[in-house]
Amino acid sequence: MKPLNLTEQILSEHLVGGAALPEAGTPITIKIDEAFTQDATGTMAMLQLEAMGVERVKTLAVNFVDHSMMQSGFRNPDDHEYLRSVSKRLGIIFSPPGAGICHFLNIENFVKPGMTGVGADSHTVNAGGMGAIYFGAGGYDVAFAMATGEYTLPMPEIVKVHLTGSLQPGVQAMDVILKMLSIVGVKGGKGKIFEYGGPGTASLSLSERATITNMGAEMGASTSIFPSDERTREYLASREREQDYRPLAADEGARYSDTIEIDLDQLEPLIALYPSPGNVERVADHVGTKIQQVCVGSCTNSSYENIASFGEQLKGKRVAVDTLLYPGSRAVAIMMANSGYLGSLFTSGVRVLENGCGACIGQGGSPPSKSVSLRTFNRNFPKRSGTPDAQVHLVSPAVAAASALTGEISLPKESLPFKQEPQVVDTQSFQMPIPADEAAKVEVVRGPNIMPLPDFEPLPDVLEGEVLLKLGDNISTDDIQPAGIYLPLRSNVKEYAMQATFTMVDQTFAERAVAHRDGGGHGFLIGGENYGQGSSREHAALCPRWLGVRCVIVKQFARIHVANLVNFGIVPLTFANADDYDRVTQGAHVSLKTGDLDGELALSVDGQEISLVPAFGKKDIPTLKAGGALALFKTTH
Ligand code: MIC
Ligand code: SF4
């Protein structure tokens, strides 16, 4: 038998309707073991699941609440109650606010080596630390996976990351993934799975591995994976889940499309400078830069180990700047209390906040104007912090601790061993599924924040209208559809679109778009490379669609966003010749024949034609023609 790498082993085990894995780029459908959402994507996913007429989900399914937890006003609590009741109704586990960040809870409680999963959040790939294959996807695709137990994606290329050596004092897992970002860049991971291996892997704990796979999302990768080995067994045993262990590794002689070598011995502390996780430099070159804020947490760096290593460096000392800390889960918070770090962090002047996403998604914790904030998070896109002119840089917990003490970017002087603490199992807060006959009687609670889904018409044979906005490279979904203060509007498409879409780029966008739409025009957007990078939020497609956008033409798309555009009936196209980007101006009157979507298309701009290539696959054509995935689902199921 041909030797298989780990990814091929797991994908082959889960392949639907096919004997062998195809060439990279060809669509594959796999059986999904787990599908989950979080509250900011979950309400929309659940509304779609209900609209599909699903009575009970087919996979292990979880709805987590971790993003939108401010509860200032009825909106967040309405969303939570809707999620709680719809979960009960459809056989989904519900994880209430306070239990922790979805990716943490997932790895602590649900993911097993060898499983497959999709989650309505780009950092779902975190689960790769457990030797599982998990993908981030839009809410519709996750709802579809819950309904059918399947997910389709282009077969990725598999790249080996060969690790040797071990991390030296003051260097942490965050530095490994920042090193990867410095090699691969923010779009270099597109269409790839990074499979870690080599002798260096054994030195990394499960939570260190999860930090690395988590932030693979920032390279645009489909996902990342570590082998399942003795360290995995240790972790599962410590969480009373040893029965879930299964050893998994690539076969001897397995093949990869490429190999990246990283010698952990040679790594040094790194920093991703504002405004991109890909702007990686040596911390040593920025020592002495004044900072005004430090934030520790996010799904990347809020494990017990992360926080304990941070706490140990601060012990007996006071922080020099405003320092905020978000534990990854309630279990982590309890371990902090048990180990004594919670008390010492308070004594050091740290503001310990709720177990959740918090400042990472701009739910509080915004830094002052024109300040510098050092964060252990995974994203530092412009304005994501909520303060338009603040700069956010990304670092490891060790660099965050050294810098919090001095008030300037500092290197960790020493590496202090932190106190080990037995794992805490905290599953009591989950609302588990009830039997189907009882579930069928549950009434779903829809407060005034839960608005019905909009209906969208099918694709006309000609799209004709204005280029509403011309954008540059690396436009993130935070630029398209910001989160932060707008998160409570996630269940109300009209309000979210009117108040937030492209507001960071052009305050007049929503009103212009609606006027154009109501005048019968079809909206077009033009963009550069890596359009739609970052989060999986389908609202970055859904809200523009509501505003009348029907076609997005760019040099290159990020993977999850292009799937979301298709799901909401927006035609995603790329320039056949990237230089043609310069030939289309904002405000131009354009038209596109969409009768035949199979093959090259021509955009007519002021009497001239520009060649365009579909960024969607053949299998997406019926979805686009129907005006979106839900419309198609209703006609075919
Ligand atoms: C993010 O980090 O941007 C988010 C918020 O977790 C998103 C999901 C969302 O927008 O709800 C993600 O990464 O997919
Ligand atoms: Fe939450 Fe931030 Fe992780 Fe997104 S990146 S899931 S907002 S902690």
Image (cartoon, rainbow, N blue to C red):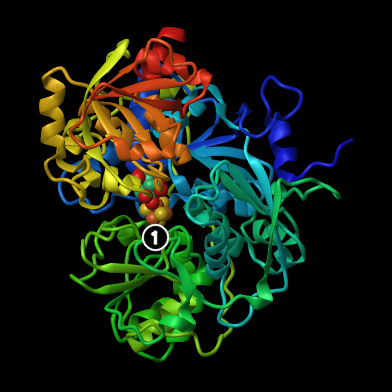
Residue 348 position by quadrant: bottom left
Q: Is residue 321 left or right of residue 99?
A: left
Outermost front residue: 608
Identified by mark 1, the residue type is: Ser
> In the displayed structure, does residue 76 sit left or right of residue 230?
left
- Residue at the disc numbered 1: 276
Foreground: 460 or 371?
460
Q: Where is residue 429 drawn, in percent x and y?
A: 43, 49
Residue 263 as seen in the image, left or right of residue 467: right
Circle 1: is it few (<14), some (14-19), or many (20+) Cα within 10 Å?
Answer: many
Q: Nearer the viewer, residue 607 or 612?
A: 607
Query: Quarter containing ligand 2?
Result: bottom left
Image quadrant assignment for residue 268: bottom right
* Residue 311 seen: no
Q: Is residue 317 above or below residue 604?
A: below
Q: Secondary structure at mark 1?
A: loop
Say if residue 223 shows up in the picture.
yes
Q: Position of residue 404 (x, y in %)?
A: 36, 82
Task: Report which quarter residue 357 is drawn in.
Answer: bottom left
Q: Residue at x 46, y 33 (%)?
A: 92
Q: Position of residue 37 (x, y in %)?
A: 42, 39
Q: Is residue 161 above or below residue 176?
A: above
Q: Between 132 and 600, which is closer to the camera in this rendering?
A: 600
Decide if ligand 1 comes within 8 Å of the CB at mark 1. no
**Which residue occupies the extreme right position in the image?**
1
Residue 195 on image: x %, y %? 67, 51
* Residue 599, above or below 191: above
